[in-house]
Image (tube, grey):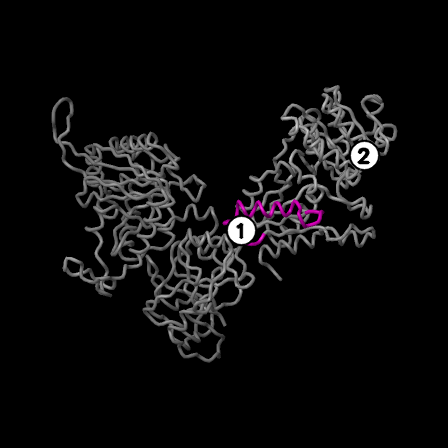
Amino acid sequence: MSTVIMPKMGDGMEEGTLLRWLKGVGDEIEAGDPIAEIETDKVTLEIEAAEGGVLTQTLIGEGETVPIGTAIATIGAEGDAPVEAAAPSAAAHIEAPVTAAPVTAAAPPAPVAANGSADVVAPTPAVVRGAGEKWRASPLVKRLAAEHGLDLQTIAGSGPGGRIVKDDVMPFITGGRQQAAVSSQPVVSQESAADSKQVAPTPAASAPVAAQAPSASGRPGGVARDLSKIRRTTGKRMTESKQAIPHFYVTSEVDMEAAMAFRSQVNAQLTDDASKVSFNDLVIKAAALALREFPNLNASMEGETLYDHANVDINIAVAIDGGLIAPFVPDADQKSVGAIARMAKDLITRARTGGLFPAEYQGGTFTISNLGMYDVEEFVAIINPPQAAILAVGSITETPVVRDGAVVVGHQMKIALSVDHRVSDGAEAAKFLIAVKKYLQNPMLLALS
Amino acid sequence: MPTVTYREALRAAMAEEMERDESIVLLGEDIGVYGGTHLITDGLLDRFGPKRVIDTPIAEGGFTGAAIGMAMNGMKPIVEMMTWNFSFQAADQIIQNAAKLHYFSGGQVHVPMVIRGPNGGGVQLSAQHTHSLEGFYGHFPGLTVVSPATPYDVKGMMLTAIRDPNPVIFLEAGALYGTKGEVPDGEYTVEFGKARIAREGTDITLISYGRQVNLLLKVAERLEKEEKVSAEVIDLRSIRPFDEKTLVDSVKKTNRAVVVQEQWRWYSVASEVAAIVQEQAFDYLDAPVERVSGAEVPAPYARNLEIAAFPSEEDIIKAVHRSLYRGA
């Protein structure tokens, strides 16, 4: 008999919701069959059976949310008697150990599943830590738990006396140190200007839970509501970023006259909409080429170690229901503008429909957040950790500019770079912006390389 | 690079420095005519004459005291203890005078001397001739204590010891006198207070010094081959001053440490290592620091008992398993 657990599908995933069972108790199952659909913080996925047999028991109900590692079903040999579904409350306390890859998801495995698993010692049998029973953990584990926001109460310990040791928590944290450096959390946020316009509360999240007492002035109090998962994840990650990373900001203004002409010219030649180039695609390419000139900004700070990345993978912050997600265009510096346009369009579309695979948003080396379409002249963004910098892009506005001694109508775009001061300084950030400007103001360079 | 024995490297360090510096003299029992009980000084009497290679009476307290006086007056004596066990006879001179004169004199007097000889056991010399004194001498401020494990280090550290303006306790790995290694011709020094990473690894840090380093390297090979465990081996080399950084950096990387020593566990180098690790890498430890030490008995004579009394590969592997939470 084997146990199916709620899998960890990515860095930062702490719990998952079972949307629906695709197999019923008593159904015969072959290895690889999808047996359930789950929803993580960011995506909806199917869980596949790791081995064949008969689904003997489902341990949680549809719509129920459980911590990762929780047993959700058992698969027995053919002939095993089906078992009545256990009460959900009991199931929630059962902790199945997270083995290297007990469950494969329909999506390509996230980096976490692919990495580190070989070194993970097979965990001891599931344990139940009773209510009020205190966990014990090694000093290392306590530190890791604090850094990664793990709740040790829910993690089984395999050490002496149930001590939670490194091997017990590593499956909950993406891979090793090096892996962590590139498997950044994709969720990014922009400051105030963005949220009010883009983020509509999800229906589930808007259900009133409790009302606040009236204020002293007698005005009615607020109505409490649960934050959506993605809102919570975004909040946690951004709080970490803003608290831990010493941000500094440099801004500049780009003359977009030439880029506009270039884009019109290119798009006029294209018949299919999928290949049409957006201003953001030009910014992606410009930033990617500029990063090649300033590789120091194409890095991630993991603890006290700085990791340089050979690849330039540009994340695009995409507004979705309830929050943001940032899929990335891999090797953007080596892709043509057309290839970037096609890929970005596909990623953005699937981000909005919930069809992204974890491998498409877990990672990336530099993020671009563009609010140009929302008539935002200028804003600054919070760094997407552990990356070193993020570029915030505003609208192209008609502005009087002086050209050849005369005031004419120009098309200007403001850009702001937020940088981790532990990694770089103002002068380098400024030079990077000059490079981005160079490419955008001379768009033929974008086509050249 | 020529391959020479630990013994030859040690002799070369002293002889080459004696050629360069006339203030260096050797003192000890049977070091001249006989060439030294362990043949460390073989041939040096013929080369440097009886004024610089001095055979002494069997009186460690006397000739050590004489050497301290020479050092105070501008010479650089190198005293051989036939084995470090006999230094108990000279302990008063070493601890009460050599270690403290610089302090007592407000810095006016230096005692630039080296006391050297084989340390530790393993060759059936029984209880009175089997001591590992690194913890004992490492206890006293004013003494520098080193314990090189390779021919390269023994030469480089002997040069550093001779040139040090203060007394150096030079603990040789007696059991390793015949082991070979690459040693450059001519002059080079190995700094005190710098540990050596004898083997890089990622899963566990094994720490020792002297002849136990070779044991750790064997264990590390076995762990790699049999269990795919990547062990880092640190050779402390210098007992006092102590390289805390190399040790702590390694444990921060591997999250676990096993310290191995031939000496007894109580009040020992391993105890100090364990304390430093918990002070400076507490939040990186995934398991308690393991100490593997000699049995708490006077060293036995019988070969089987002597083997049982010192750390073995199996003892170390058991400690590694405890640290990795594997097996029992």
In percent of width and height, residue A288 lies at: 33, 38
Compared to residue A397, the image places residue B279 above or below, namely below
Q: Chain of mark 1?
A: B
User: Which residue position is annotated with label 2?
Assistant: B60
Image height check: is B213 above or below A404?
Answer: below
Q: Position of residue A341 (x, y in %)?
A: 28, 44
The image shows residue B136 at horizontal and vertical percentages of 70, 42
Considering depth in this image, is A76 or B275 the residue closer to the camera? B275
Q: Residue furthest right?
A: B33
Say few, some or many: other residues with alpha carbon within 10 Å of mark 1 (under 14 / 14 to 19 / 20 or more): many
In the figure, is residue B43 to the left or right of A7?
A: right
Frontmost residue, B8 versus B71: B71
Tell whether label 1 touches label 2 (CB within 8 Å). Answer: no
Label 1: state its secondary structure. loop
Do callouts 2 and 1 point to residues on the same chain? yes
Is-magenta flag for residue B278?
yes
Q: Nearer the viewer, mark 2 or mark 1?
A: 2
Which label number is shown at residue B285?
A: 1
Amino acid type, residue under disc 1 in the picture: Leu
Q: Indicate the chain on which mark 2 is placed.
A: B
- For the residue pair A86 and A119, the one nearer the viewer reads as A86
- B49 to A28, vertically: above or below: above
Residue A339 visible in the snapshot: no
Say what amino acid the circle numbered 2 marks: Glu
Which corner quadrant of the image does residue B110 belong to? top right
Taking the image as shown, residue B211 lies to the left or right of residue A262, namely right
For the record, the magenta segment spans B261-288
Q: Residue at x 82, y 52 (%)?
A: B303
